[in-house]
Amino acid sequence: MPKSEVKTSLLDNMIGVGDSVLLEPLTEDTFLENLKNRFDHSEIYTYIGSVVISVNPYRHLPIYTPEKVEEYRNRNFYELSPHIYALADEAYRSLRDQDKDQCILITGESGAGKTEASKLVMSYVAAVCGKGAEVNQVKEQLLQSNPVLEAFGNAKTMRNDNSSRFGKYMDIEFDFKGDPLGGVISNYLLEKSRVVKQPRGERNFHIFYQLLSGGSEDLLKQLKLEREFNQYNYLGLDSAKVNGVDDAANFRTVKNAMQIVGFMDDEVELVLEVVAAVLKLGNIEFKPESRVNGLDESRIQDKNELKEICELLGQDQAVLERAFSFRTVEAKQEKVSTTLNVAQAYYARDALAKNLYNRLFTWLVNRINESIKAQSKVRKKVMGVLDIYGFEIFENSNNSFEQFIINYCNEKLQQIFIELTLKEEQEEYIKEGIEWTHIEYFNNAIICELIENNTNGILAMLDEECLRPGTVTDETFLEKLNQVCAVHERFESRMSKSSRFLNDTTLPHNCFRIQHYAGKVMYHVEGFVDKNNDLLYRDLSQAMWKTNHVLVKSLFPEGNPVKMSLKRPPTAGSQFKASVATLMKNLQTKNPNYIRCIKPNDQKAPHIFAEALVRHQVRYLGLMENVRVRRAGYAFKQPYESCLERYKMLCSQTWPHWRQGSRDGVKVLLTELQIPPEEFSYGRSKIFIRNPRTLFELEDLRKRRLEDLATLIQKIYRGWKCRTNFLLMKKSQIIISAWTKRHFQRKKYLQLKNVTLIIQSYIRGWKARKLLRELKHQKRCEESATTIAAYWRGFQVRREYRKFFRANAGRKIYEFTIQRIMQKYFLEMKKKLPSMSPTEKTWPPRPYFFLDDTHTELKRIFHLWRCKKYRDQFTEQKKAIFEEKLEASELFKDKKALYTNSVQQPFQGDYLEISKNPKYQKLNGAVEEKIVLADVVNKINRANGKVAPRIFLLTQSNFILADQKSGQIKSTIPVMDITSVSVSKQTDGLFAVHLKEGSTAAAKGDFLFTSDRLIEIITKLYRTIFFKTNQKINVEINNEFLVQFNQDKVCVKFIQGAQKNGNLPTCKRKNNRLLEVTVP
Ligand SMILES: Nc1ncnc2c1ncn2[C@@H]1O[C@H](COP(=O)(O)OP(=O)(O)O)[C@@H](O)[C@H]1O
Ligand SMILES: [Mg+2]
């Protein structure tokens, strides 16, 4: 839906009319009625075309919220109900988008809400322009400059609790994007007389009260101040407290704001010192003192205050005291000092206080400017906001020079308003090519002329008077006016030369009256000359320059004697005139936006709409004229595009789309609606509607048509919605069915594919098998053919070659082969033969299976041969020894434990060598035969088992026992008598020799011997007996055997036990039957 359709309009939900131009009928009464009606409904803003009228509500309205800011942001001026934000937005956007410098002119009398309006505009612009840390700081500084300036420049007056006592024009500077860069503030004519004197019911500037209420004890002590207001002459006592104003809290706000704006702590301190000094100046009092020469002199009553001021400002007390007592006038080269009387001293004091404060204020503005000035040098767009004091009329001819100046300024503003508004309006008609008859309105240029004309204007006269030598008083000034301005139609004076007012008793003699655009104002001439001169005695400015106070010193540069000039400073009037002229020039270069503030009542109360008061303001502000001018030609104008956009639905040709130019569209539209042609005119880019009623008719038609359209839209929307729904469903259905069909088709396809694959595989299998069979068959055929061919060829070859073979050729070949193999075998065996040692067991493996038997046999033969070879190397002697050893082995091996020891011992046989030993010569002689064995053995006594050594001598036929020492033969026993021998199984050397029963040798019984060489002895004995008798004796090996002792048969029993004397057995005859032998 296009955005424009939902937009509301100025004309929607309107209370009265939002734009007074639409009033019908237009009279002052209806105008006021409309304002009142809207005011009662909390609609404080009303337009006259693009001018905003603001009626002070004197209460907080919920129309300045951030939501409101958003609502008005980027909307057209007439789109929403009237608001100051609409104007601010319009100004800001045309500044940003159309690159037009803007100024916001806020006028209205004191208390009408100008300052509030200026703050609202500034806060709106701050809210909608760019964001970001740097931009926010600039905004914050711009906004916070307000509380500082208000504290020093505002005061409670009868009309306004927070009345601006200075004019302020602030330029806010923006970059091309519309982000704020900084600002410049200009101030106009601070009402400095307020410092020393305030009208009843009014206060001095806020800062004095704020400092005394909000300053800490320490601060006050430092500034040498008392907290009570009534301590100070300069503070208006009767209205020191203002309802709903918390001076202490405001003091904190101001200090905080000063900090944000960029004041250093010491700067704040300096400022407060000056404020304190001004306050204390008021307490200096003078008393008259007559001198001898008759001149009046004055003296300071209580010097304590003076001393404290001097301490505060770092001033030499004597210097200041002198400055209050003398006045030095320098004329040409002369320097004349005159004393001051009391009145003059007070005048000097007050002048100093006013000047000090005024200069401090100017310094503050400059200081703020320094902080907020734009840093970058880029081209700037400017929005100026002018909040200047409003038109002021005091009753009882209390209007003085200040009011005169203020009203002059307002006169100038009215002038610029008239010029720009009316000129703009008229120019527009001309530009649009609309027939235009000039509208009469009161042009106040004539009043401006009366005041500012350089030759005979009031200000020029005043200056002339001030500069004139001779006695100059306010009265001489009035006289001058009476002469020069007498003929001016707007100037009234009792004594004027034209004598027009000679009988006007309402006009006192010391007053003159000016018919301002806003009404007649009577000015009291008293103080005009002084105030215009703005005289500060040179002694005082020099004294101020001499202080050690940095700030004060800088405020009085003319006090520097080096820079002293005798030229008079420009008068206050001419200064003001010049600055107003600059301001006007400045404003004229900018696109003006007007806010005209109206004060609804004098009580500062909400909900009261004092009609007379408002009527008066409406009159002097020229609002009716403003409306009339706007309406003179046409009440309402609108560009063709927006007009067509708003009303095109009223005509079938332009609805919904008009393809040609919007001007033609509007023409077609108005023709079809049958609106009388005199009701409108076609401009170049705008349609001008003469009568508001026509517009309302159009609006009514539009409203009704909108209802129809709403129904139509509803209808179409519903149809569209249903159709969309239907189409969606249809689409879904198609999608679903497509998917289903796809699914089934796919399933079918897969089935078919499977079946095909199976059939295919069967066919391929069958084909492959068939092929395999064929190939196999073919291969077999080929193989068979080859075999047959081979056999056939073999057969053929054999048949062919048979004649070449002998019958036994095969055998020969075989034998030859075998021979070769055998040959090889033996030759290789020769190399592989094992060692010749008979104990060697290894034998190389056989190479051929068929040689198995041969191989074993060969091994046997080799072994035998090896043994034979081994034996062949033995001598006869050695052979005998081996035979003996063999015999011993056969007898004892594995039977008697002693045997193993004997294996290594060679059998020597003759251990005694009887033939060589002379000791045995006799014995040797008795033995004829060859000695087989000769050794010493132990014979065991048959009776007690004791042992005795005996030579045991064995020959080929006997064995002889002889005494070991003497060789005396004890017994000779033929070997044939020996029947057997008995030994134990143990390692002992005991043996028994059994003798044949009945033989001579056997008379005493069998013999028992022990010998380590038992094995050798028995073996030799055995062999000897065998050689002699060819019989083998029995060798009994047992651990228990019987022996024959004399007639007894005794059992020899071996038992194991501990051995006492080496290997010798211990024998013990137990009884007749038992001989125990203990063996190891
Ligand atoms: N738009 C407003 N909404 C609420 N109160 C307002 C508004 N405008 C003015 N006022 C009240 O009126 C008083 C005077 O307004 P101010 O702007 O100081 O007047 P001026 O500057 O014209 O002398 C303000 O202190 C405030 O209380
Ligand atoms: Mg103000």
Image (cartoon, rainbow, N blue to C red):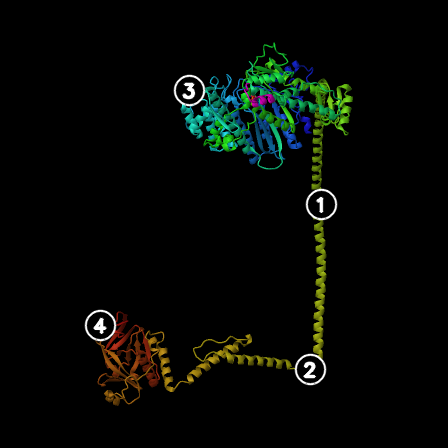
Identify the secondary structure beneath mark 2.
helix
- The residue at the point 69 percent across, 26 percent down is 5
Q: Earlier in the sequence, mark 1 or mark 4?
A: 1
Identify the secondary structure beneath mark 3.
loop
Q: Earlier in the sequence, mark 1 or mark 2?
A: 1
Pointers 1 and 2 in contact (C-beta within 8 Å)? no
Q: Amino acid at mark 4?
A: Asn
Vertical position of residue 270 compared to residue 243: above or below: below
Distance between mark 1 and mark 2 Cα atoms: 80 Å
Q: Where residue 562 sits: x, y (%)?
A: 50, 33
Residue 1071: which disc?
4
Q: Nearer the viewer, residue 1002 or 364?
A: 364
Check disc 3 and report the residue beneath it. 292
Please give left or right for residue 307 compared with residue 172 in the image: left
Q: Residues within 10 Å of mark 1 (few under 14, many from 20)?
A: few
Q: Earlier in the sequence, mark 4 or mark 3?
A: 3
Please give left or right for residue 882 compared with residue 656 in the image: left
- Region in magenta: 459-473
The mark closer to the camera, 3 or 1, is 3
Please give left or right for residue 75 compared with residue 954 in the image: right
Check disc 2 and report the residue beneath it. 804
Q: Earlier in the sequence, mark 3 or mark 1?
A: 3
Q: Nearer the viewer, residue 567 or 207?
A: 567
The mark closer to the camera, 1 or 4, is 1
Residue 533: which disc?
none
Q: Residues within 10 Å of mark 2 (few under 14, many from 20)?
A: few
Residue 749: which disc?
1
- Residue 1051 in view of the camera: yes
Q: Amino acid at mark 1?
A: Tyr
Distance between mark 3 and mark 2 Cα atoms: 197 Å
